[in-house]
Image: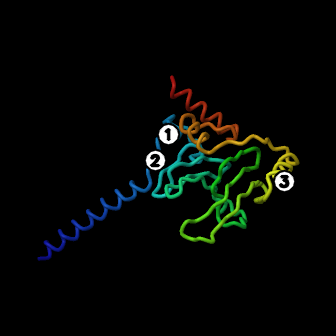
């Protein structure tokens, strides 16, 4: 009787272990990024390793630790401001991000109006935003003209990128213009070795 119970317990343990492993794989898969042996070259994973999870489909690294990511549920791009402990009067993130740019210590762009079908009176207005990473400060603008005036004061480029286009570029060549020069150099060296 004891040996039967022991075998039953082992069987349950094995089943649960396999089940947990499959669940973990299902909700945390590495996406298809080019393999340039980045890990062997000890390049910071933030710049090349992104994951699909149960709720996230795509990520774009910005300035460490900030990323843009797209969720399965809404198919909209989200910028998590909690990662860097930045106070955000609208909550833990900026969404949906329609366009953006990264320059020096700044992440900036435009988020459209956000509503919730399930909550009739939930409306998050459209905003333009500038995040100063160095000062850990987020400023929202209600008018595009005020936003553009601030960009000019800060001498930031008035060029904007769409997340979907940047993500496709990143999937094909994970060297983005705003990455630190040493990271870009490491990634380029890894690509060159891979192409030989």
> Is 56 situated left or right of 120 in this image?
left
**Relative to 86, 5 lies left or right:** left
User: Within 10 Å of the Cα at label 1, are there few (<14), some (14-19), or many (20+) other Cα atoms?
Assistant: some
Observer-nearest of 44 and 34 = 34
Depth check, mark 2 against mark 3: the one in front is: 3
SS state under label 1: loop
> Which residue reaches farthest left?
1
Residue 30 is marked as 2
Location of the N terminus by quadrant is bottom left
Mark 3 lies on a secondary structure that is helix
Please say if the residues under marks 1 and 2 sit with CB atoms less than 8 Å apart.
yes
Report, in whole angstroms, how far the alpha carbon at label 1 lies from the one at label 2: 8 Å
Residue at the location (47% across, 45% down)?
31
3 vs 1, front mark: 3
The answer to which of marks 2 and 3 sits earlier in the sequence is 2
Q: Position of residue 36 (x, y in %)?
A: 51, 34
Q: Which mark is residue 33?
A: 1
Residue at 53% of width from left, 46% of height from top?
49
Q: How far apart are marks 2 and 3 (CA)?
A: 41 Å
Q: How many labels does the image show?
A: 3
In the displayed orientation, state which residue is furthest to the top: 196
Mark 2 lies on a secondary structure that is: strand
Q: Locate residue 89 relative to residue 83 in the image: left or right.
A: right
Residue at numbered disc 3: 146
Residue with the most extreme right position: 153
């Amino acid at each position: 009787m004891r040996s039967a119970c022991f075998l039953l317990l082992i069987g349950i343990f094995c089943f649960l272990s396999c089940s947990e492993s499959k669940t973990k794989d299902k909700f945390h898969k590495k996406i298809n990024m080019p393999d340039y042996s980045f890990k062997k070259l000890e390049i910071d994973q933030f710049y090349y390793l992104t994951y699909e999870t149960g709720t996230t489909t795509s990520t774009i690294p910005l300035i460490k630790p900030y990323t843009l990511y797209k969720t399965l549920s809404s198919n909209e791009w989200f910028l998590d401001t909690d990662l860097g402990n930045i106070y955000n009067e609208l909550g833990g993130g900026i969404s949906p991000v329609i366009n953006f740019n990264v320059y020096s210590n700044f992440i900036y762009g435009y988020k459209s109006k956000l509503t919730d079908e399930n909550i009739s009176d939930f409306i998050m207005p459209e905003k333009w935003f500038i995040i100063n990473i160095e000062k850990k400060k987020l400023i929202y603008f209600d008018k595009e003209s005020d936003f553009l005036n601030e960009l000019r004061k800060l001498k930031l480029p008035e060029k904007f990128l769409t997340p979907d286009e940047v993500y496709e570029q990143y999937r094909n060549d994970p060297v983005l213009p705003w990455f630190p020069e040493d990271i870009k150099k490491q990634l380029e060296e890894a690509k060159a070795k891979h192409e030989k």
